[in-house]
Image (cartoon, grey):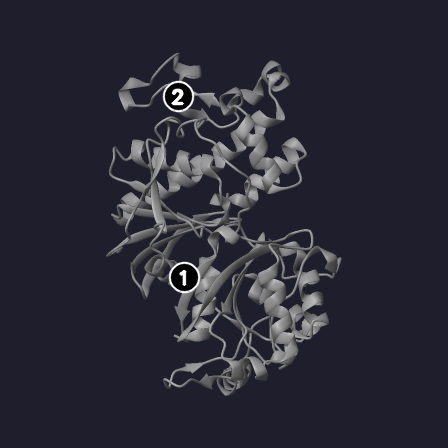
Amino acid sequence: MEKRNGHHGENEPETGENEETAPAPPKQSCSRSDESNIFILDGNNTETTTTGGCATTDERRTSTSNYSSRQKIDSLGKIRPPFPWFGMDIGGTLVKLVYFEPKDITAEEEQEEVENLKSIRRYLTSNIAYGKTGIRDVHLEMKDLTICGRTGNLHFIRFPTQDLPAFLQMARNKHFSSLHTTLCATGGGAYKFEFDFRQMADLQLLKLDELDCLIRGVLYIDSVVSNPSECYYYENPTDPEHCVQKPFTLENPYPLLLVNIGSGVSILAVYSKNNYKRVTGTSLGGGTFLGLCCLLTGCSSFEEALEMASQGESTHVDKLVRDIYGGDYERFGLPGWAVASSFGNMVCKEKRESISKEDLARATLVSITNNIGSITRMVALNENIERVVFVGNFLRVNTLSMKLLAYAMDYWSKGQLKALFLRHEGYFGSVGALLELLDPS
């Protein structure tokens, strides 16, 4: 038997992505698509060859050598790479990009800047949308941030992974490789599409482990964001009139359970900055929600699926404890509103004919969210960790799922577990990649 039906709370649209536990299909190269769908990026003109999709020892040595030769030493003696500064996370559903826009450029630096670099900066910072699918999340922008001895603004940009070919084609058209910069990338796509970056855009990737980048990004962003607080929780999550966000300070955060909800889900037990393990995960994540909604409702985007879910009623689709017992199952403390069987009512023809597409979308969202919450609670108990932080693009403005997780963690743990959330939900991997560019571990 599962958790509750989670009908309280409002939500807005979004997209999810990360890793999954199901076996991965054979590696494929991405094909070219209409470049009008997306925008530009960054890269370098050094070419390498790969064996089995991974860099060889000689390639890593060559990449590191080229990377080091392009670094500069500032007046304080700090080593830093040349602009532009990017970090990239190529997930199964979304590509997340962070771009550092320097605001302290000297007259001498401005005079020395090549036109390509100026063009890229103007393009990225003067638009909030790029083609049909690229979005800059302006509300997440971090202004006047000092990093690696420079002051500027950190921008957060996303676009669907399926539009990566158009992105690479535009990067090629903009001659991005002429800037001789290193593009630090993480996520499975950094490996899957490495050949496409070289072949289509003459760009070389410095590939990084996605979980290392995730944790580094989370700890960094939380340390530099204070107003409003990066970390928060929901008080009274099931009461629409009294539900409010409350700031939470992640001081001395360890041990910490980090639940990354993307296309699939990874659950990490973090004991210190450099000591963590991936405990488990599930293939049922944001990608599952979108895929099932596309099949069941005919929707075509995550935004549309979430909007439909916000209008539906999952109890029309799910079989609850009270549908079986006529009320609570008191012996084991199961309330009548708890979900006994997700989609259990759909075995009845009459009920199948009475439900709406919105009900199906809502039931799908509740099923996926309940499953994630249930697994998370079991891991927290097994690892003896009380602090649980949920991240990932599945939660971006997905208030419905966040409130459901908040209630479930509190209710089923009898107040021992509190669900925590972070404002930069899905960008921590790309932030970690940027930090590796500026301060290699």
Residue 368 left/right relative to 43: left
Q: Residue furthest right?
A: 34
Q: Residue furthest front?
A: 107
Element type at marker 1?
helix
Q: Nearer the viewer, residue 110 or 89?
A: 110
The answer to whether one can see residue 50 in this image is: yes
Question: Crowdedness of circle 1 by 10 Å Cα count: few (<14), some, many (20+)?
Answer: many
Instruction: Name the residue at 58% across, 52% down.
Output: 93
**Which quadrant does the N terminus fall into?**
top left
Question: Crowdedness of circle 2 by 10 Å Cα count: few (<14), some, many (20+)?
Answer: some
Q: Which mark is residue 310?
A: none
Q: Position of residue 196 (x, y in %)?
A: 67, 68
Amino acid type at circle 1 is Gly
Instruction: Provide the residue designation for mark 2.
Output: 337
Q: Position of residue 59 (x, y in %)?
A: 55, 82
Residue 352 left/right relative to 173: left
Instruction: Provide the residue designation for mark 1.
Output: 217
Q: Position of residue 434 (x, y in %)?
A: 47, 68
Instruction: Name the residue at 35% across, 61% down.
Output: 224
* Above-or-below relation of 376 to 109: above
> CA gap, disc 2 to disc 1?
38 Å
Q: Position of residue 198 (x, y in %)?
A: 66, 74
Amino acid type at circle 2 is Trp
Q: On the image, which quarter does residue 167 sit in?
A: bottom right
Element type at marker 2?
loop
Q: Nearer the viewer, residue 171 or 314?
A: 171
* Above-or-below relation of 232 to 435: above
**Which quadrant does the C terminus fall into?**
bottom left
The answer to whether one can see residue 193 in this image is: no
Instruction: Name the residue at 67% across, 66% down.
Output: 168
